[in-house]
C-alpha cells in the first residue's frame, strides 16, 4: 500500500480517536459469536471518512459501469467518487481507458454525465484539448510563454489502471495495485453459467443525494437477516431460511451468498415469478436461487434466473451517496415481443424493494448519529455482514500501518 505517488496522498494522522475506532473494528471482526458490528463513527464521523477515503477508495478496485455503455470510440461515462472525478472512455483503438478528467491548465472538469466526446476532450474554459489517449493536443495562446511541444511533452490527463470483469469496468487509483480478477475466482466460478459478460445493459437510473453513508448500501444487499422482516411477504419465496454462506478468505475480493427459492424460476416482482425467458445454460439449482454479491467498495448485485440487477455506490460525503442502478439481460431476452412491457414490470418490482431499503437505511443513518449508539451483536444470519467488515478491516489496518511506518 505504499505504491501511490506521494503527491496524491492526503496525509491522515492517526489520532487517538481514530486508533480507538480501529481497535473496536478489529475486535468486532473476530467471529459471529464473539464479534459485533461497526461503531457509529464509521458511518458519521468526518475524520473516519477521510481516513477510509485513503484506506479504501484510493487503493481498491472501483466499478464505474459496463463495457456496453461506451460501445463506440469517444463514448464516455463520468462518475464522481466523492471529490475524485473519473471518466471511462473508449479510445480510438477501441480500448477502454479511465482518466481523471481535470484540465492540466486550471483544473476545469472536462466533461459531465455521459455521451460522446467525438475524438477529443475539449476544456470549455480555455479550449485546452486532449486526445482519447489522454495526451494534450492543443493549447491556444500558449506558445508565447511555453512552446506547445514542451506542453505536449509534459501534459496529459492522469490515467488509471483498468480491468474488465464479466463486462463490468473497474479502475484502481493505485498504479501498482495487484489485479482484481484473481481475487474473484470463487465468485467467477459460481456465475459461469450466467454468461454475464454477454448480457445487454438497460439504461442506468441515477438516484442522487441519498442521505446515508456508503457502507449500509452494500450491507443491505448482502445481509439476508432483514429480508423476512423489512420486505415481508415480497421476499418470502427467497426466505432467509434458504440462505447459505460462502466461506471468506483474506485474499477474497468479493462477499456473496446464494439464497434458495421455494419454487423454480422465481422473480423479485409482485408475481414472484420470472417474467422473461430463463437463462438456458443454468442448471436446476441455479433456477431455484438468487446470488447476492458485493465487490467492495462500490458494486453490489443480485443474479436471478432471468438476468441481473446491480447498483454502483458513489460516496459523496460521510452521510451521502449517489447511486447508479442497472439491469442486465441476455440479448435474446431483449428480442422478446413484449420485452419493454415485461422489463418495466420487473423494474417496478425492484423499486419496491429499493424504497423499503432506502427508508430503513436512512433511519439507520439517523440512529448512528446518536452518541449512545453502541455496536450490536451478530445474528447467525449475518455471516456475510461479518465478512464485509473483515474485508474492510484488512484494508483499514494495512493503511494504518503505513501511517505508523511513515
Image (spheres, rainbow, N blue to C red):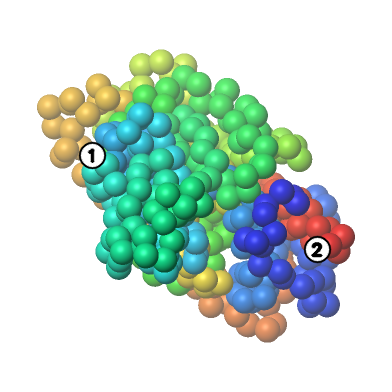
Q: Residues within 10 Å of mark 1 (few under 14, many from 20)?
A: some
Q: Image check: 367 left or right of 199? A: right
Q: Image check: 146 left or right of 332? A: right
Q: Please tell me whether mark 1 or mark 2 is closer to you in this view.
A: 2
Extreme residue toward the right, this view:
405
Q: Image check: 46 left or right of 145? A: right
- Residue 285's x, y, as percent? 50, 22
Q: Which residue is found at the position 53% from the left and 45% from the top?
A: 160
On screen, 282 above or below 133?
Answer: above
Query: Which mark, residue 153?
Result: none
Residue 151 showing in the rendered view: yes
Using the image as rendered, state which of residue 338 and residue 238 is in the foreground. Answer: 338
Residue 330 lies in quadrant: top left
Q: Image check: 369 left or right of 118? A: right
Total labels: the figure holds 2
Query: Which mark, residue 343?
Result: 1
Q: Mark 1 near mark 2, Cβ–Cβ under 8 Å?
A: no
On screen, 374 above or below 340?
Answer: below
Q: Which residue is found at the position 18% from the left and 33% from the top?
A: 339
Residue 67 lies in quadrant: top left
Using the image as rendered, state which of residue 212 and residue 15 is in the foreground. Answer: 15
1 or 2: tag closer to the N-terminus: 1
Residue 28 showing in the rendered view: no
Q: Which residue is found at the position 26% from the left and 47% from the top?
A: 117
- Residue 21's x, y, as percent? 77, 70
Query: Which mark, residue 403?
Result: 2
Using the image as rendered, state which of residue 153 and residue 91 is in the foreground. Answer: 153
- Residue 237's x, y, as percent? 43, 39
On screen, 288 above or below 309?
Answer: above
User: Is label 1 in a helix, a strand or a loop?
Assistant: helix
User: Is label 2 in a helix, a strand or a loop?
Assistant: helix
Q: Which residue is found at the position 76% from the left and 40% from the top?
A: 250
Amino acid at each position: 500500500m505504499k505504491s501511490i505517488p506521494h503527491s496524491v496522498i492526503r496525509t491522515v494522522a492517526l489520532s487517538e480517536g481514530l486508533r480507538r475506532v480501529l481497535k473496536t473494528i478489529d475486535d468486532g471482526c473476530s467471529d459471529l459469536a464473539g464479534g459485533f458490528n461497526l461503531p457509529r463513527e464509521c458511518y458519521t464521523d468526518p475524520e473516519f471518512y477521510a481516513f477510509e477515503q485513503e484506506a479504501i477508495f484510493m487503493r481498491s478496485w472501483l466499478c464505474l459501469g459496463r463495457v456496453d455503455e461506451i460501445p463506440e470510440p469517444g463514448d464516455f461515462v463520468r462518475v464522481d467518487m466523492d471529490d475524485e472525478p473519473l471518466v471511462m472512455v473508449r479510445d480510438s483503438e477501441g480500448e477502454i481507458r479511465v482518466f481523471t478528467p481535470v484540465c492540466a491548465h486550471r483544473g476545469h472538469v472536462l466533461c459531465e454525465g455521459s455521451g460522446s466526446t467525438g475524438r477529443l476532450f475539449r476544456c470549455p474554459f480555455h479550449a485546452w484539448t486532449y486526445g482519447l489517449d489522454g495526451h494534450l493536443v492543443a493549447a491556444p495562446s500558449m506558445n508565447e510563454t511555453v512552446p506547445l511541444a514542451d506542453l505536449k511533452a509534459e501534459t496529459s490527463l492522469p490515467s488509471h489502471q483498468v480491468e474488465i470483469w464479466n463486462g463490468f469496468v473497474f479502475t484502481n487509483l493505485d498504479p501498482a495495485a495487484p489485479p482484481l480478477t484473481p481475487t474473484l475466482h470463487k465468485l467467477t466460478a459460481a456465475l459461469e453459467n450466467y454468461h454475464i459478460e454477454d448480457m445487454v445493459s438497460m439504461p442506468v437510473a441515477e438516484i442522487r443525494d441519498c442521505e446515508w453513508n456508503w457502507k449500509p448500501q452494500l450491507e443491505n444487499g448482502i445481509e439476508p437477516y432483514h429480508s423476512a422482516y423489512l420486505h415481508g411477504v415480497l421476499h418470502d419465496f427467497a426466505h432467509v431460511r434458504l440462505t447459505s454462506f460462502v466461506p471468506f478468505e483474506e485474499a477474497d475480493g468479493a462477499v456473496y451468498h446464494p439464497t434458495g427459492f421455494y419454487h423454480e424460476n422465481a422473480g423479485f416482482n409482485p408475481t414472484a415469478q420470472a417474467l422473461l425467458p430463463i437463462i438456458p445454460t443454468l442448471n436446476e439449482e441455479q433456477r431455484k436461487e438468487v446470488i447476492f454479491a458485493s465487490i467492495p467498495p462500490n458494486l453490489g448485485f443480485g443474479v436471478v434466473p432471468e438476468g441481473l440487477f446491480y447498483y454502483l455506490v458513489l460516496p459523496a460525503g460521510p452521510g451521502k451517496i449517489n447511486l447508479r442502478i442497472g439491469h442486465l439481460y441476455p440479448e435474446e431476452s431483449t428480442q422478446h415481443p413484449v420485452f419493454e412491457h415485461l422489463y418495466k414490470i420487473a423494474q417496478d418490482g425492484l423499486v419496491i424493494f429499493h424504497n423499503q431499503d432506502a427508508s430503513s437505511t436512512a433511519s439507520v443513518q439517523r440512529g448512528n448519529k446518536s452518541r449512545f449508539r453502541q455496536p450490536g451483536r451478530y445474528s447467525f444470519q449475518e455471516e456475510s455482514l461479518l465478512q464485509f467488515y473483515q474485508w474492510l478491516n484488512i484494508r483499514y489496518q494495512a493503511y494504518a500501518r503505513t501511517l505508523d511506518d511513515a
